[in-house]
Amino acid sequence: MAAMLSFLRRKPTPDPLASPRWPAIGRAMPLLQGLTAEEWERLEQRMRTFLADKSFNAVQGLALDQDKLLVIAAQAALPVMNLDDSAYHGWFDVVVYPTAFVSRDAWRDEIGLVHEGEFEYAGMARSDGPLLLSWPDSQAGPALDGWNLVIHECAHKLDMLNGSANGFPPLHAGMSQTDWTRAFERGYRDFCRRLDRGERMAIDPYAAENPAEFFAVLSECFFELPHLLHTEYPAIYTQLREFYRQDPGMRLPVIGVDEAGWYDN
């Protein structure tokens, strides 16, 4: 009986979106323009799940206040707005840095030798769990410029749901593995060829690093510059529209290449 009374007296969990600063923070994000009332409600539900399920830790002297949490959560929730709450399962920690950070990593060269060195990152989706984010890059993410750190790293996490990140996340029932593979393989080869020819690119050349980065970078472009992606790689746009179960091109304004910015190689 005592245990039952203790349970009955337990206070309800506070709503993380009860901040007086929300939804003004979200309404100010260009990334979230055009969401319907129903979509906004789903976004907020995914934000609540994300904030409740993840443990947030600030390091190197960064003060992690509620506003910062809301900015990160809104961007993380957008890709899974029309998916279920299991989309981000299997990892629990979000570590936020005051600037880009250094990580020591190993890599294997083309002849199989393993090397190790230190590299600077704005973000990282670690295969052993944590999501690492630079706050300045996370804060700048909602601009419609085709570069969004939070969406990029969350795309890697979705890619990892069926193993290591390789650009082939688990597809929904009804999606064709053949169509996905054809669209992404052709797009990746074309993208790499264009870079090799020295073309100026409106999509971040980092996409050519490997198929996993191609998927993550094009996911950023899908949510921020959907019309550009649809023009450049319509078959990939179709696959991402089916995968994320939404169509940003129907709600975001058309932004020209000169407005989005070119990447010089």
Image (spheres, helix red, strand yellow):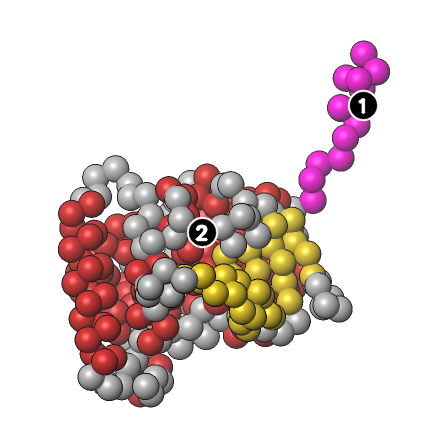
Q: Residues within 10 Å of mark 2 (few under 14, many from 20)?
A: many
Inspect the magenta stretch and tell me whether residue 131 lies in it: no
> Is 78 drawn above or below residue 232 in the view shown?
above
Image: magenta residue range: 1-14
Write down the residue under mark 2: 157
- Foreground pick, 160 / 203: 160
Mark 1 and mark 2 in contact (Cβ < 8 Å)? no
**Residue 121 in view (yes/no):** yes
Of label 2 and label 1, which has the lower sequence position? 1
> Is 49 drawn above or below residue 115 in the view shown?
above
SS label for mark 1: helix
Could you say which disc has been placed on residue 112 in the image?
none
Residue at the far top in the pictured view = 1
Residue positioned 65% across, 49% down in the render: 55
Q: Position of residue 233 (x, y in %)?
A: 20, 67
Tag 2: residue type?
A: Lys
**Relative to 151, is 166 on the left or the right?**
left
- Foreground pick, 235 / 247: 235
SS label for mark 2: helix
Q: Position of residue 149 (x, y in %)?
A: 48, 67
Residue 70's image quarter?
Answer: bottom right
Q: Residues within 10 Å of mark 1 (few under 14, many from 20)?
A: few
Q: Position of residue 56 (x, y in %)?
A: 65, 54
**Relative to 245, is 59 on the left or the right?**
right
Write down the residue under mark 1: 6
Residue positioned 36% across, 60% down in the render: 112
Tag 1: residue type?
A: Ser
Residue positioned 40% across, 77% down in the render: 145
Q: Position of residue 173 (x, y in %)?
A: 25, 37
Tell me the quadrant of the picture where the N terminus can be found: top right
> Is 234 drawn above or below residue 3 in the view shown?
below
